[in-house]
Image: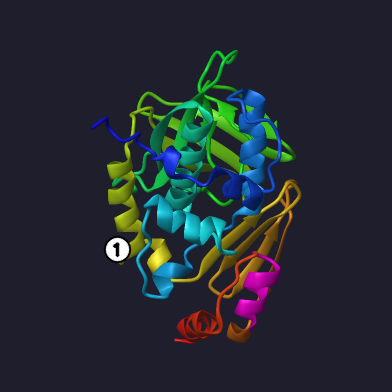
Amino acid sequence: MPAQPPWRGAELDLDAYLTRIAYDGDRTPTASTLHALIRAHTTAIPFENLETLLGRPVPLDLDSLQRKLIHSRRGGWCYENAVLFAAALERLGFDFTALSGRVTMGAAGPLDIPARPATHALLAVRVPGSAHPLIVDVGFGAGPLAAYPLAERGEFALGDWRFRLERLPECWVLHQFARDGWVDRYTFTEAPQYPIDYEVANHYVATSPHSPFTRRVFAQRFYPEVHHILDKTTWTAEYPDGRAESRALEPDELPKVLTEVFDIDLNAADAARIVATVRD
């Protein structure tokens, strides 16, 4: 039998996926198609970790991802989003390599010792006419809304949001401008990753007591003009110019805010369990 394509794009219900992200544009594997797909996916599917708090596994098989991210009004974290997007890119004929990153988010330095685990998923996509691979990040929960070239450069904007990419001897570092000013967001290398690598890292994120996503509610919703963050019971809206507004929520408010702000629908039983988890 021939080897199964790495990201199982042939198994993706492409029309359902494109409907979910409200994309009806060109399907040829070009840079413009890539940017449009990233923007559509990033603004349609939220970031969330609620399955871990509900005591359920977070599988990466394509059937599970389609049930949750396409056919339900739910979101996922980086591995779920990246694997689904990789399947779509493969199905559309894009040439890409999966990568892995270490989230730093303003730690004392991007190469802190001991290093943080590699728990973030990115893709490097090669398109005709581009001198460099284009880095795609649809799973961070905070954009960007387009790909950026893998080439050291000064400050650049993707929409109204500002970034900077730095090359160190050991890795690349992406910096972003947010409410705390410039912070390093994550480091990454160009070492190829495969589905099994994502499975291993995803298991750590979903089960380790050291993972930030096994300990509290965390959700994000990203738009061109605002980035919504729900961290435990604090709802923050960040803006491209660095402004931020925060509000403390009562536990009983969470299901309503998750639905109305973050586009995450929970059934009554799951909503009650999330409220109880926050109260404990």
Quick check: 159 above or below 259?
above
Residue 97 located within the stretch drawn in magenta: no
Quick check: 172 above or below 215?
above
Q: Estimate the x, y position of residue 82 in percent, counting from the top left.
A: 47, 44
Residue 173 seen in the current view: no
Q: Which residues are magenta?
A: 253-262
Residue 258 located within the stretch drawn in magenta: yes
Check disc 1 and report the residue beneath it.
208
* 67, 219: nearer the viewer: 67
- Which quadrant does the N terminus fall into? top left
Q: Is residue 200 left or right of residue 73?
A: left
Q: Estimate the x, y position of residue 73 in percent, counting from the top left.
A: 59, 64
Please report the residue visible at 66 percent of the width from the left and 78 percent of the height from the top. 256
Quick check: 80 above or below 182?
below
Q: Estimate the x, y position of residue 179 in percent, counting from the top left.
A: 66, 52
Q: Quadrant of residue 149?
A: top right
Q: Quadrant of residue 259?
A: bottom right
Amino acid type for the residue under numbered disc 1: Ser
Residue lying at the far left of the rendered structure? 1
